Amino acid sequence: MTGFVKRFLLYKGNNLDRENVVWNIIGSFCYAFASMVLAFIVMRMAGDEDGGIFAIGFSTFGQQVFIVAYFGIRPFQITDGRNEYSFGDYFRLRIATSIAAVSIAAAYPMFMMAGGTYSPRKMVIVFLLALYKMIDGFADVYESEFQRQGSLYLTGKSNTFRTLLSVFCFLICLGISDSLLAASCTAVAAQAAGVAVFNIGVVNSGILKNICREVKKGAAVRLFGQTWLLFLSVFLDFYIFSSPKYAIDLKMSDAANGYFNIIFMPTSVIYLAANFIIRPFLTKLTDCWNERKFDEFRAIGNKIGMIIGGLTILAAALSVLLGPWALGIMEMILGSDYTGSLTRYHVPFVLIIIGGGLYALANLSYYLLVIMRKQKLIFAVYLVLAVAGWIASPVMVERYGISGAAVCYLILMAVLTAGFTAGQLFCLKKEENQK
């Protein structure tokens, strides 16, 4: 394994910054593109009902389970430039959160089946897809450490190769067996194998010399104490982001979930495009904040915000002009049975894209607040919005269907962006006055 890692994964050139950026882009693109490919192919091969089951299991509940395993620690870990905690400390906590994630992955579908909302088959598929996402969340502790050690390219390679392996196995099994259940089992096995090779294998190879596996007594508990609010914030964040999807799963059919998932896809592209821009600057932003270089901190933040804002305006304009054409192309990809099934949702499609751009801006302010270590402020904003989403989403979906879900999503994202932006600007101004 060590020979494989050194030969095929280790970068030996002299332009590490470029390697980090390139592989971060490739890995993030593969991760996002795979989700879109799977959503389309499942709907085309298995029908809109199974497409809806896949959507809730993979993109919604599965992602919520991922967050439980992930525990929202990545921004904390990659900005831990002073090595307050070792990799061993982060790893021990991730084991505990992954066990909790498996428990939730099993409990929620069983609860939904007991209430008559899920069939036994849907329950098992949703569990398997959530288990797949849990493994993804476990892998993140390795990939965050790669980035903290200055080797973001290893994170990108892991994302790329793990994703390609699991997607390939999933699609081959789905094509042969015509069974979403069997394909989900295969994907879980492939994901586990990918983590063994591209994450565990890299750490065990010793190519990253500064990784410390030592576990200090009580460190994991202290780390939990410092990050539990961050976790709850990320958990609530995704609930806010997905509350219209949960409402559709509760109030409408599996097919409706599938259609909404398709028109919701551009939000993932916008979010990942924003991360392409944000992530390479996180270390620099952290250094500026720790060294109290507030003018430079503000300048970098403003520059990133202007780029994301410009891309949002461009995406919104294109969705207005080319939305019906793009949705028509999606229908052609899905097959003749889906003619007219997506183009009728042009207006919700535009609203969702605008909301996705606002969410990207909110994500920028979120990272800035994490660097400032303002977990309580982050949590307060999320809590208010989560309650609002929990109340409003089912009502809007029940009354207005998919259009109601899109409007609710846009409003939630607008308020979230306003709250985070105001919060980080206030905190920055306060620190500047104390300088």
Image (cartoon, rainbow, N blue to C red):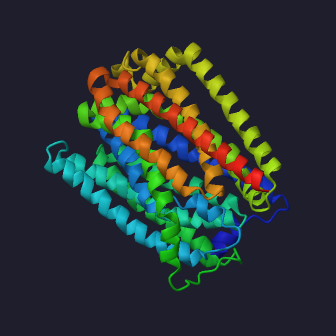
Above or below — where is 262 with respect to 147?
Answer: above
The residue drawn where x is 79% and y is 58% is 292
- On the image, the x and y values in percent for residue 161 come to 57, 56
Q: Residue furthest front?
A: 434
Left or right: 203 with respect to 50? right
Left or right: 279 with respect to 176? right
- On the image, the x and y values in percent for residue 327 come to 48, 20
Using the rendered view, name the quadrant where residue 148 is placed: bottom right
The residue drawn where x is 81% and y is 55% is 293
Viewer-proximal residue among 403 and 305: 305
The residue drawn where x is 71% and y is 63% is 151
Viewer-proximal residue among 132 and 426: 426
Residue 193 seen anywhere in this rendered image of the structure: yes
Q: Quadrant location of the N terminus?
A: bottom right
- On the image, the x and y values in percent for residue 60 come to 39, 44
The residue drawn where x is 47% and y is 52% is 233
Q: Residue furthest right?
A: 14
Using the rendered view, name the quadrant where residue 375 is placed: bottom right
- On the image, the x and y values in percent for residue 383 come to 43, 47
